[in-house]
Image (cartoon, rainbow, N blue to C red):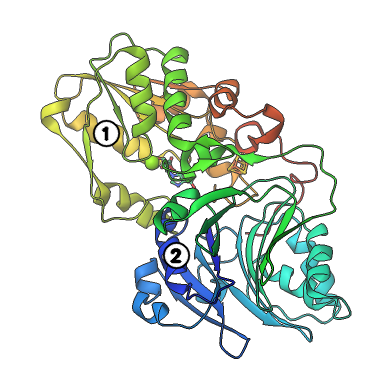
Amino acid sequence: CGIFGAYSPMGKKVLEDVYLGLYALQHRGQEAAGVAWVNPQGRISSIKGSGLVHLALNQAELAAVETSCAIGHVRYSTAGGSELANAQPLTASTSKTSLAVAHNGNLTNAGGIKLFLENRGAIFHSATDTEVILHLMAHQPHKESLDALLDSLTRLRGAYSLAMVIGQDLVAARDPWGFRPLVIGKRDDVFYVSSETCALNLVGASVVREVEPGEVVIFGRKGMDSIPIPVDVKRRYGCAFEFVYFARPDSVISGRSVYEVRKELGRKLADRAPCPEAHLATGMPDSGTIAALGYAEKSATPYEQTVVRNRYVGRTFIEPTQRVRELGVRIKLNPITEVLSGKNVVVVDDSIVRGTTCQRMISMIKACGASQVHVRISSPPVRFPCYYGIDTPTRVELAAARMNLRQLEREVGADSLSYITEEDLIEAIGLPCGEVCTACFSGQYMEGGEDNEPEL
Ligand code: 5GP
Ligand code: SF4
Ligand code: MG
């Protein structure tokens, strides 16, 4: 998912900026979009809709709304189905205040908390893990809202980057492990929070800094304030997959350019798995193209675009059904016979999940007359599901968990198939290895994370 928030202490209208921010975060979720804001009565209003931002929301309508405090969300379902009831922001009012929350990530102990609260009379309206945050807050009516929030956050395990409206304030929070990105921006008097820096660029804001793992940041009348979440953690778990695939390449996460990391992943791949017989290197559009550039550069293989992508079709993986997913590849991609015919081709992609994309691409490329197709993957094999907000399927559906490398090579029809290692991945990301999550590659989940699967 993607989240965005804006706050102007001078009373400027901010809802159009939230719309635009969501537009730049569209790649993080295409299932639904929504916004929530403080209305002139000091309460919270919200609008949500299905599908892409421009279909779910009306820009002109939002631009006219008088509000200086607003948040938004683009949804891609990890917990809960794709019904509109599960779309965000979620809103609630307690005896003390009104609340709205937009969540990116996935809580690993939501099931347990939900059971606990239901035994005490709570009635849940959605199937999302996010709703437990609101209920936890509502169950502490004697406390001030921020205290209730802090107390609630200390009970959560797993991944949460949050943009919230609490009363009249914008509040951002990031889990102590730092799974999902969250960054603060500013333009004139207006503060922004965003999943990625690319959305700050779009609204003309400069990057102030990241919300730190384990930090709550409050934007209110008196400016910006920060409170730590009192949870001790042994290490951080910044998601490696954001760099590999999920984030936009024009974003910067933890001070590292996503573009640069992807290119470096490609260079590492060239060292790890050279292919001297190749005539050309190409990337699977769009996710493999930057790593392919790095591969071509490092191995001195000519880079060619060999497949054209219909840019008006959404990402195949994210559309929910297997049927749509399978059709998606054909709807989306068309290989260029004139470039491929008679050639030995290195095809670089960012990852293999179910293996569908790879298999289809190879058969399309071979049907164009390519002599050999060598597949190079710019991440280690994905063998484990993610419980922290990336929608990987269960173990039995993961191609690299079901098969060894040679079997997978045969299954997808490649003349050769190679991956980078986990060490290559960590080196390319360039952050200390104790700060990066690689659980979907290694199976090493955060403490307690492996036996706390959310019910998907
Ligand atoms: P597959 O076809 O093997 O199931 O999926 C792999 C392809 O899906 C890759 O080209 C990758 O770029 C793309 N992809 C899209 N969304 C995701 C995601 O959330 N996780 C992963 N691992 N790959 C994704
Ligand atoms: Fe990211 Fe994989 Fe960790 Fe999930 S398990 S947070 S996708 S690195
Ligand atoms: Mg792809």
Residue 90 vs residue 200, the one in the foreground: 200
Horizontally, is 190 left or right of 445 in the view?
A: left
SS of the residue under disc 2: loop
Q: Mark 2 points at which residue?
A: 31
Instruction: Say whether disc 2 or disc 1 marks the residue closer to the N-terminus.
Output: 2
Camera-side mark, 2 or 1: 2
Task: Tell me the quadrant of the picture where the C terminus can be found.
Answer: bottom right
Residue 1 vs residue 276, the one in the foreground: 1
Disc 1 marks which amino acid?
Answer: Ser
Residue 350, by quadrant, is: top left
Relative to 39, say whether 5 is above or below: above
* Residue 357 visible from this viewpoint: yes
From mark 2 to mark 1, how far is it between C-alphas? Answer: 30 Å
Splitting the image into four quadrants, where does ligand 1 fall? top left
Q: Position of residue 278 (x, y in %)?
A: 27, 14
SS of the residue under disc 1: helix
Q: Mark 1 packing: few (<14 Cα in 10 Å), some, or many (20+)?
A: some
Q: Where is residue 10 in the image (x, y as percent from the top left)?
A: 56, 74
Residue 294 vs residue 438, the one in the foreground: 294
Q: Name the residue under label 1.
A: 363
Disc 2 marks which amino acid?
Answer: Glu
Q: Which residue is most to the left?
A: 338
Q: Position of residue 169 (x, y in %)?
A: 66, 73
Q: Residue at x 67, y 27 (%)?
A: 432
